[in-house]
Image: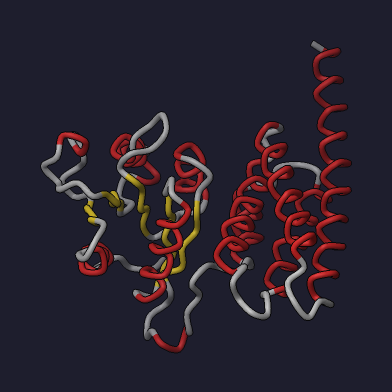
Amino acid sequence: MALFDDIVANLTQEFLGESSDRLARMQVSLTNLAGAKVANRDAIMTLSREIHSVKGAAANFHFRTVATVAHRFEDYMSATLDQAPLPIEDYQRFVDCLSDLIELGREPDPKQAAKMQSRLPVLADFDPTSVSAKPGRALVVIRARTMGHMLSRELANCGFRAQTALDVYDALRLSVTDRPDIVLTSAVMDGISGVDLINAIRSIKATADLPCAVVTSFDRDHPELAGLPKNAGVVRLGKTLSDDLGTVLTGVAPR
């Protein structure tokens, strides 16, 4: 057992060292992007590659917060690469957060992880003066990245900030640790369906009253939604999406 623990410890240190090297390359890429008059394709490709590598390795070594931040960084980059100029300062905040996590050398406690992630940029940000109440927080579990971006924009219009989960397992963890105001999940997911995820959330005492909804092209009476709790919402894709989302969010009180 001691030998196994030593092997794991050594591999973890290798991961931390390699991640530090990757973060250094990310920083070089950001510096190159900041100084370029036009988008530097090589710098963007390097940055994207290093983020993806850190995300994958972090998940393997159970550094869930590192993986989550890297995943959010990927999503944010994907949604903002068409901007001119690129939001380099926002990218820098992601790199700084990842650097702090790697320097910590361990998975942070839930409160610390939530605090660190709360400082990150969010997709489809909105003017906080445009809403009279405290902005809400929505945990989004969507397979298709483009759909996630669209949903983030719709949420922003309703005064909610979107946080994406890596997968249904990450969503279940974040539902407990971060206590979002609502969880929105695709009905069809890999392995565990959105309906199963909502039922799992409802089965946990700490999240039993957490508002949830599925985002789907199906009507509520479709067989794919069998077992969906009666008080869970349904947000249908298409022309009714905005109206359905508004209905689901009505009465959700930001914590």
> In which image quadrant can residue 57 be found?
top right
Q: Residue furthest left?
A: 221
Looking at the image, residue 64 sits to the left or right of residue 170; the answer is right
Q: Position of residue 180 (x, y in %)?
A: 43, 57
Name the spot of residue 249 as percent of width and height, x first. 28, 66
Report the side of 87 relative to 30 (left or right): left
Give the left or right position of residue 39, taking residue 253 as reference.
right
Picture quadrant where residue 253 is located: bottom left
Q: What residue appears at the point 11 percent right and 42 percent down from the top-left corner?
A: 221
Question: How many numbered marks appear?
Answer: 0
Give the side of residue 60 with respect to residue 136, left or right.
right
Nearer to the camera, 239 or 17: 239
- The percent position of residue 147, horizontal first and vertical second, equals 40, 56
Viewer-nearest residue: 106 or 31: 31
Name the quadrant of the C terminus. Answer: bottom left
Residue at the (45%, 89%) spot, across then down: 129
Image position, residue 16 (x, y; %): 83, 41
At x 41%, y 87%, the residue is 130
Residue furthest to the bottom: 129
Applied colour scheme: secondary structure
> For residue 12, which quarter of the picture?
top right
Which quadrant is the N terminus positioned in? top right
